[in-house]
Amino acid sequence: MSHYSFFFVSSYLSFLGNGKQQQKDAASTRADYPIPPQCGVYYFEITIVRGLKGCMGVGVCGKSVNLNRLPGWDRYSYGYHGDDGNFFSFSGNGVSYGPKFTSGDVVGCGINLVNKTIFFTKNGVHLGIASRDLEHIDDLYPTVGLQTTGEVVDANFGQRPFRFDIRPEMEVESFSTVSCPRLVSSWMACEGYSKSMASFCNAAKLVPEEDEQSIEMRKGDNSFFMRLLSNTNLITALQKKIPNGEENSLSSCK
């Protein structure tokens, strides 16, 4: 049976399956578009409108993941489940993570695309990092899975204020993703580390402020002027640097 047969979709998401009898009764749905890799931190919340047993999961998954199971049970799938408070990743065996959640609770899921971590919140409280070194961060979709008849959730992707204040997380990552890399690349260029700057900009997906050739030419000029300043016979040093056709202009300076 297609996973679409399990859901009634309006402004809310509702599960119409046979109930929690076995894992195949579960169904998940994901957002239409993946999380943008360049956004730094991505966050969404799910309000549990009805779901006393908490047989549901909130998280993210890859596009190829089977949607007839709760998030976290398959490869490239991560989920926080309400019935036991466990976090699941690539496995049907979860690890202890946070409190259970049920009707009336607001559960949030946050993805830090800079350090490849995932965290969750409950009723505005940060529950800590659930997993590090997420894989395939350029192909992750917000996902919600339900497993008990009559469960209803309401998703919030920012169309109204979040229960959790995400702004501090965004401000920290804004500095990390924009200011720091640009400052580092500028410093490397200024100090003449052309090859290191090129490698760093490539890894950080930055456009270099100065190309390698320009940096190397500037390094050569700086080296010349440093030697010149340490030489008491300035005219002799300049005559070695400047083409023969321009030596007469130096003679007039004597």
Image (cartoon, rainbow, N blue to C red):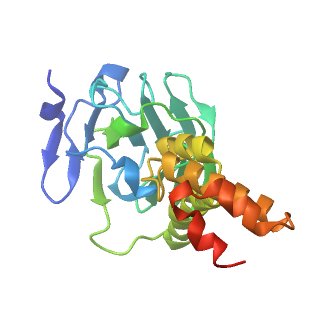
Which quarter of the image is occupied by the N terminus?
A: top left
Q: Residue 155 appears in which quarter of the rendering? A: bottom left
Q: Residue 241 appears in which quarter of the rendering? A: bottom right
Front position in the image: 254 or 127: 254
Q: Residue at x 51, y 59 (%)?
A: 245
130 on left or right of 50: right
Q: What number of labels is visible?
A: 0
Q: Residue at x 63, y 78 (%)?
A: 252
Front position in the image: 178 or 78: 178
Q: Percent position (x, y) of residue 63?
A: 28, 31
Q: Work out whether residue 69 can be spotted.
A: yes
Front position in the image: 23 or 253: 253
Q: Percent position (x, y) of residue 175?
A: 56, 67
Q: Percent position (x, y) of residue 246?
A: 53, 64
Which quarter of the image is occupied by the C terminus?
A: bottom right
Front position in the image: 191 or 58: 191
Q: Percent position (x, y) of residue 64?
A: 28, 24
Residue 54 vertical placement versus 227 (above, below): above
Q: Work out whether residue 191 can be spotted.
A: no
189 on left or right of 153: right
